[in-house]
Image (cartoon, helix red, strand yellow):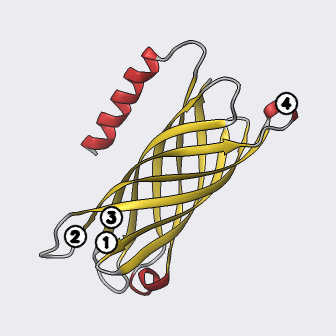
């Protein structure tokens, strides 16, 4: 939680320094996180969310972003949970429509994730994480679907997130 708070404070600081011709927005989103493959065999459907800071330069459809998130799943038939805290950076390519009210997009991100669980004798690990995304922006609402994946001891851990969010900023 301290990391997320620090990111929000840092983002607000960057927001105050942004040039007037560049656009900066915050996207707060959350939703269901559906485990896939072997990960599905040991975890129930989870939940998660993220705070994205988007930087859009004028005259181009590409938006750069930094993201901090939190995802959680209950380990099947136990009282334990698995937690993933991803910190990623990436791009989104918007397909603008007349009036820019509805804008579909595709994107991708890479980064580092901290992986934890409350299982006794478990430790926190850092993993390389990646995520392609498709979504649609309707005015100040964002709806997206993300495939998120990382490798853990030769096993692919992946999930599919369906998220809804709000866009703040200009």
Q: Residue furthest left?
A: 121
Q: Of marks 4 and 1, which one's residue comes earlier in the chain?
A: 1
Q: Residue furthest right?
A: 98
- Going by the image, does 124 lie left or right of 133? left
The location of residue 149, given as percent across then percent down, is 45, 68
- Badge number at residue 83: 3
* Gap in angstroms between the C-alphas marked 2 and 3: 8 Å
The location of residue 167, given as percent across then percent down, is 60, 36
Q: Of marks 1 and 2, which one's residue comes earlier in the chain?
A: 1
Which residue position holds label 2? 118
- Going by the image, does 90 lie left or right of 119? right
78 or 139: nearer the viewer: 139
* Gap in angstroms between the C-alphas marked 1 and 3: 7 Å
Question: What residue sits 60% from the left and 36% below the top?
Answer: 63
* Gap in angstroms between the C-alphas marked 3 and 4: 40 Å
164 or 158: nearer the viewer: 158
In the rendered image of this protein, does residue 62 appear above or below residue 169? Answer: below
Pointer 1 with pointer 3, Cβ within 8 A: yes
- Going by the image, does 124 lie left or right of 164? left
Classify 10 Å Cα crowding around label 2: few (below 14), some (14-19), many (20 and above). Answer: some
- Badge number at residue 99: 4
- Badge number at residue 81: 1
> What kind of element bears circle 2?
loop
> What kind of element bears circle 4?
helix
Mark 2 or 4, which is nearer the eye?
4
Pointer 1 with pointer 2, Cβ within 8 A: yes
Pointer 2 with pointer 3, Cβ within 8 A: yes
163 or 145: nearer the viewer: 145
* Gap in angstroms between the C-alphas marked 1 and 2: 6 Å
Q: Residue furthest top?
A: 20
């Amino acid at each position: 939680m301290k990391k997320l708070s620090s990111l929000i404070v840092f983002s607000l600081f960057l927001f105050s320094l942004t040039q007037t011709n560049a656009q900066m927005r915050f996207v707060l989103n959350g939703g269901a996180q559906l485990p896939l493959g072997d990960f599905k065999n040991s975890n129930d459907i989870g939940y998660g969310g993220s705070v994205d800071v988007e930087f859009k330069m004028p005259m181009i459809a590409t938006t750069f972003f930094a993201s901090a998130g939190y995802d959680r799943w209950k380990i099947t038939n136990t009282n334990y949970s698995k937690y993933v805290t991803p910190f990623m950076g990436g791009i989104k390519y918007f397909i603008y429509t007349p009036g820019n009210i509805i804008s579909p997009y595709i994107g991708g991100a890479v980064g580092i994730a901290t992986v934890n669980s409350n299982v006794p004798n478990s430790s926190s690990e850092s993993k390389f994480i990646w995520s392609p995304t498709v979504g649609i922006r309707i005015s100040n609402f964002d709806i997206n679907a993300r495939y998120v994946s990382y490798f853990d001891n030769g096993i692919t851990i992946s999930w599919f997130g369906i998220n809804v969010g709000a866009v703040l900023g200009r």
